[in-house]
Image (spheres, coloured by chain):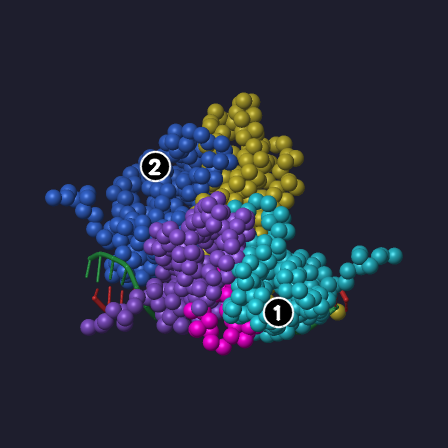
Chain colours: A purple, B cyan, C blue, D yellow, E green, F red
Amino acid sequence: MENKQDKKNTASLILEAATEEFSKFGLAGARIDRIAKLAGVNKAMIYYHFQSKEKLYQTIIEQFVDKLRHFFKERIVLLDNPEEIFLNLSEFYNSHFANPTFIPILLREIASGGDMIKKTFAEFMAEGPAHKLKAVIENSVEQGSFRNIDSRQAIASFIGMNLFYLIMSPLVNNILEIKDEKDFREKRPEAIVDLFFNGIKTK
Amino acid sequence: MENKQDKKNTASLILEAATEEFSKFGLAGARIDRIAKLAGVNKAMIYYHFQSKEKLYQTIIEQFVDKLRHFFKERIVLLDNPEEIFLNLSEFYNSHFANPTFIPILLREIASGGDMIKKTFAEFMAEGPAHKLKAVIENSVEQGSFRNIDSRQAIASFIGMNLFYLIMSPLVNNILEIKDEKDFREKRPEAIVDLFFNGIKTK
Amino acid sequence: MENKQDKKNTASLILEAATEEFSKFGLAGARIDRIAKLAGVNKAMIYYHFQSKEKLYQTIIEQFVDKLRHFFKERIVLLDNPEEIFLNLSEFYNSHFANPTFIPILLREIASGGDMIKKTFAEFMAEGPAHKLKAVIENSVEQGSFRNIDSRQAIASFIGMNLFYLIMSPLVNNILEIKDEKDFREKRPEAIVDLFFNGIKTK
Amino acid sequence: MENKQDKKNTASLILEAATEEFSKFGLAGARIDRIAKLAGVNKAMIYYHFQSKEKLYQTIIEQFVDKLRHFFKERIVLLDNPEEIFLNLSEFYNSHFANPTFIPILLREIASGGDMIKKTFAEFMAEGPAHKLKAVIENSVEQGSFRNIDSRQAIASFIGMNLFYLIMSPLVNNILEIKDEKDFREKRPEAIVDLFFNGIKTK
DNA sequence: TATGAATGAGATTTCATTCAT
DNA sequence: CATGAATGAAATCTCATTCAT
């Protein structure tokens, strides 16, 4: 009579432990021994289920990208009003890039030139947010509701405003002496969109 | 009769090679063998000059921080006009965070919780740009030339706009299909300051 | 309603696969995993039926020796005329040592000092062909129909002529540029006996 | 003040130990640990000097082939009289294939299909002994001093007579109950050539 | 019998570091 | 300062064997 929580299978125990390990130490710094111990499984089981350290790592990256892709599909796409789109996207970033385990993995992937993540990630971003934003901005510029600016510069700025803090929060908290992080985080999407929208719209 | 250019000493050959190696592979992934080969020196020389892999790594980080600190000292501090300050800072970032060798090192340091870099880097940022910006913004809000916004949110956004692209340019170029990177990069400070200033000032 | 051919039982599937595997890789190089996959059975079944890798191997060797012993019992023993005996034996070798799966096993056994095969194999050879040949040759020498030679040297030569090509055919085909292997093989016993008999008999 | 014997360098100590180990256990069965211990060197030295177990193995095979090639170059080639050629070749085999350490390696290589040895070995044999023999035999047949036989069959027999005992001596000694092995071995070339020559020449 | 997962011992290989010269 | 060789600890991975079902 086990409940579902207890009956975690070996493969997922390994994945969890490995995610933690890779997050802390990166691919090169991760130790199979530690992952096994953390997962409470026999070291050989890691190879039984995932073949190699590299493949284990890739599995984790793929899961992460899949998850992002999945979340994105469900939202944003449907909206129309520009401000709503920006806010929605900002909230999307705010909720899905807040995972403190994945941020280090992501950073290191980018540092490594991370071909895999670059490809999948960029593809997902380009198909999704980037296209959407480009269309919205260029449309608004044409209609005269936005100032005549380079949409790519605007998008780069918008994504930067959103992701930078999420990715670098420990650093930024330190620099800006933010003590009420939770509150700061919650108010971030609104603050971003307020700044961005005021910056871009015609007076 | 060698001139100074030719007479690179072993220590600096090692430092150059090591910087490259750490940039590509991180601390854990770096290989002393490869550094030695790349530097064209004997492996043991690395230990003779730098004692250990970790110390070699630290030397490099410190050099980087020193350089930043040095550049910062020379500028910005003296300016008064808010828009000038923003533009100046943006240009500062644009020129000093463009080093493609250091970006990966920086990213990985952040990913690792990089106590060392976090401390030195944050300290430098807080003392310098952050303080300056905070003062400027809060002053302008008081004087009514800026809207009444949370200065910390604004600063986080400003830094994000600036650094995000510099750090993630390969990714962002991909996503936004930027082909004229050089041109895009050159125009970035102006575009950022234009957006930010319009977003923050009172109409 | 399967017929006997179809209904191969697990044990014999394993034996077939294992023979193939041991032939290719030897005892040390063989992998239980591969045998199981090749046989299309679960790895644990191999242990259920054969207890261990070593026992599985022994089973195969024993089968091989049994088969040889069996074939030998049926023939040769009964013959009288020397030339007939040589030809018969040569044909016996030619047909029973042509198995391309067993040759590598045999070679490796010999290489290993193969106590097991050495004992069983040597015993079988000594009891059978060697004794028979020795008697025939020494008898013929006494009767003056053979030249006065050392019967052991003659036998070593005769066996060598026969087995060497059978064992090393890939090598020898290469060296002698034999393209019509089938034909060459068929004519071998006659060629051997012709040479040997002419070499040994009195003029 | 060491004499030359004592001052064996690490690489050759490893080669010696490895040759012994591969001879006893084959490539798959050999253990790096054992080789290191036997050579009295640190395990890592094996990788320092030879990169991997496989490469170490290949180095040994190549040395063996080189040695054979070297010996062959010095002799046989110059001779004219057929019987002399046969005797010379027989003695060549007898002295160079008697190495009890290499025989097992050779056997296992052949068992494995040993592409490398097959190629180099076959090439050396074809260039050398095989060509020489073929020419001699076909010439003698034409001149009427040899019976009209298939030269390839004759060569296969001649090589077989020679090599079989050298390769399988433990087995053959057992079968033929040879106790005076040294004596038997010494007399072998003469016995072989006597049988072969009588078998092949016209009466 | 049959299966997929698990185990433990050990095999190969790597790598930071040091030594002798 | 410089070098090639050496070391020891540890890391990755393998594999025969067994277990639970």
Q: Amino acid type of disc 1?
A: Val
Residue D101, image x and y in percent? 53, 55
Q: Residue at x 54, y 22 (%)?
A: D142
Residue A105, visible in the rendered structure: no
Residue B65, image x and y in percent? 66, 68
Magenta-colored span: A160-186
Q: Which residue is mark 2?
A: C91
Q: Residue at x 48, y 57 (%)?
A: A197
| Direction from residue A113 to residue C108 in the image, left or right | left
Residue B45, image x and y in percent? 71, 66
**Where is residue B43, by image quadrant?**
bottom right
Instruction: Confirm whether the magenta stretch covers residue A177.
Output: yes
Q: Residue at x 23, y 53 (%)?
A: C10
Q: Residue at x 39, y 33 (%)?
A: C185
Q: Is residue A133 above or below residue D141?
A: below
* In front of the other: C158 or A105: A105
**Where is residue B76, by image quadrant?**
bottom right
Tags 2 and 1 in contact by the CB under 8 Å rule?
no
Q: Quadrant of the C terminus of chain B?
A: bottom right
Q: Which residue is mark 1?
A: B136
Q: Residues within 10 Å of mark 1 (few under 14, many from 20)?
A: some
